[in-house]
Each structure stands twice: as structure tokens, then as C-alpha cells.
Amino acid sequence: MCTVGRLTIDDLVFWPSGRTLIGQPGGNSLYSALGARIWTSDVWAITRQGRDYPVDRVQQVMSRVHLVLIPVDAPSMSAWGLYEGNGDRQWLPHPESGTQDQMTPRPDELPIDLLTCEAFHIASMSPELQIAWAVQLQREGTVISADSMPVEVVGSGSAAGIDRHASLLSLVDFYLPSSVEARVMFGSDNPEAAAKAFANSGPRAVVVKLGPEGCLVYDALSGQVAHVPAFGSAVDPTGAGDAFCGGFLAGYVSTGDAIAAAQYGSVSASFAVESVGMASLMDPDLNSLDERLATVRQGTSLGQ
């Protein structure tokens, strides 16, 4: 399977403790690929690389996943990540940061030999590029999952934003928004109702990520609703949602079941949050996989 997204350099500040983590290499392409890598050995990530992105971290990641790096003559994306005590966060780009547009790969940059990948995950990116990727991949007949478009780009409730959102949903098999993004695009804070509404536009399943509360899954094919819990507690929540997405798609490829796939995603996210940065995703304790998955399965509740 393959993920498509960006590389970033993150400077994190946690309130009220004042703890800081400066210069953390990251990006949704890496976190989603590493989340998938928990479950399968054949994982690719397609991303653009700014001229100042840490080479040593790229080399480390290449020991875990296959990277297609597209060099661009621009600075890497870098931003302050400000975490509130309740888990909310906001990102403030550095003045010298590269732009989202500069760092996001294009569909025509997809290597021909990756067209045979069984499944693709499209990470969060501009609406135009996310839709372009979905159009290209749907043409190839592959399984497609997509994270939500950035709320600040799509716009809250705008006609153009709603149209772009619906276009994306009509092209993908699985849609994996956060609770915040689902609330903005649906118009109210009701994850189950949002998931069902989104599924009406085409996805076979919608999964609303609920942070430390796990996720809500709506399988449109069966009509089943499930709540899948998170596992463990968070030391650093950066990248958890992306790791979940990668684990979800790997889980679906393995099981063919959306609820089981969300359980895989929850386990992948547990590795992302249990240490600073990508450390636990880079060197996961695979001996704990069965225990983690069993705990998540036991805590899963089904509804209608």
C-alpha cells in the first residue's frame, strides 16, 4: 500500500506545562506510512522534500518504509504546534516556511510502478490536490482512503467548501475526518449523524476520529455503527491521526472489514502517542501487538 502527503518540521509547545519539542521531523506522509508499517512490510510513501529537511531522519525512515522523495527548491514546511491543556491545538507557520502547495506531491509525480499498489491513503492537503489524487487513483481501480481536507482551507459552511467536500467523498472508499473537521463540515457536533451524512455521498465507510476517546465507525454497506476505543495514554499526540489512517487502511487490506480496520488504526495510533515524535513508530514493540489489539477489540461497542 502507499500513502501520499507532506513532510514537515514541527516546533511543539504544550500548555500549561510549558514543555517544548523543537525541530521534530514529521509530516502526514511519514506518520501514515509508519502507522501502516505496524501491520505490513510493503509500505510506500510519496512526498516532496524541501531543501533543508533533515537528511538523517529521512534515512532512518527509509529503514522502515519505501520513500519516493521529490526534491523541490524551497524551504521545508515548518510551524509552531500549540497544544492546549484540553487537547486542542493550532498550527502557526514560521515566516520562512515552505507552503503547503510547494510541499504537496502531484498526481503526475506518481511513479508508474506504484500504480499496482492495492490501496492508497491520501493525507490532508488542499482540496484541489486531494480531489486530483482521488480522480487519478479511482481511474486505476485501487482502494482509496482519505483524511479530511484542512478546515481552514475548505471554509466553514461555504458553498464552495461543501461542493469540494462532496466531490472528494464521491471518489473515495473510506473517509477519515477528525471530530473537529466533521463538526465544521456537518454543521453540528454529532459524529454519528455526520458519518452517516458523509456516507450518503459515496464512501463505503466513514470513521470520525475522536482523539483520546477513540473513533466512531459507520459501515455504510452493513449499516453498522461502532465505537472503537483508543489504547493507552498520550505522551505526544502529534501524528496520531495520521498513524491511525495508515493503520486503518492496512487493516482493511488485511481483513476486508471497516470496524476491524479501525481497531488496527487504534493500535497504530497508540504507538504514535506513547513517545516523543516518531520514536515508537520507528521501533515499535511488536510483541505487544496482540495484547493491544485484543484490548481494543474488547472495548469496541456496537450500535445501530
Image: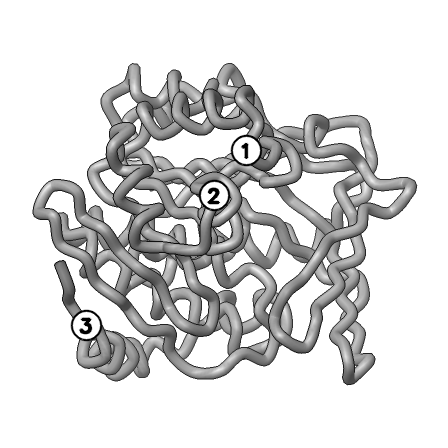
Q: Label 1 amino acid? A: Gly
Question: Which amino acid does the dot numbered 3 rest on?
Answer: Ser
Q: Nearer the viewer, residue 182 or 279?
A: 182
Residue at position x 57%, y 69% from top? 237
Question: Residue at left 31%, top 82%?
Answer: 287
Disc 2 vs disc 3: which is toward the camera? 2
- Provide residue 132's location: percent of width, then percent of height: 47, 18
Residue 122 located left or right of residue 58: left
Q: Which residue is mark 1?
A: 157
Reading the image, the residue beneath label 2 is 187
Vertical placement of 162 versus 79: above or below? above
- Asked whether the residues under the numbered discs 3 and 1 touch, taking CB atoms below 8 Å apart as contact, a structural biologist would say no
Mark 3–mark 1 distance (CA, rounded to whole Å): 32 Å
Residue 200 vs 17, above or below: the answer is above
**Which residue lies under the disc numbered 3?**
301
Q: Are marks 2 and 3 in contact (CB under 8 Å)?
A: no
Q: Which callout, 2 or 3, points at the residue further toward the start of the chain?
A: 2
Can residue 252 be seen at all in this image of the molecule? yes
Q: Residues within 10 Å of mark 3 (few under 14, many from 20)?
A: few
Q: Quadrant of residue 232?
A: bottom left
| Residue 134 rendering spot, x and y as whole percentages | 39, 24
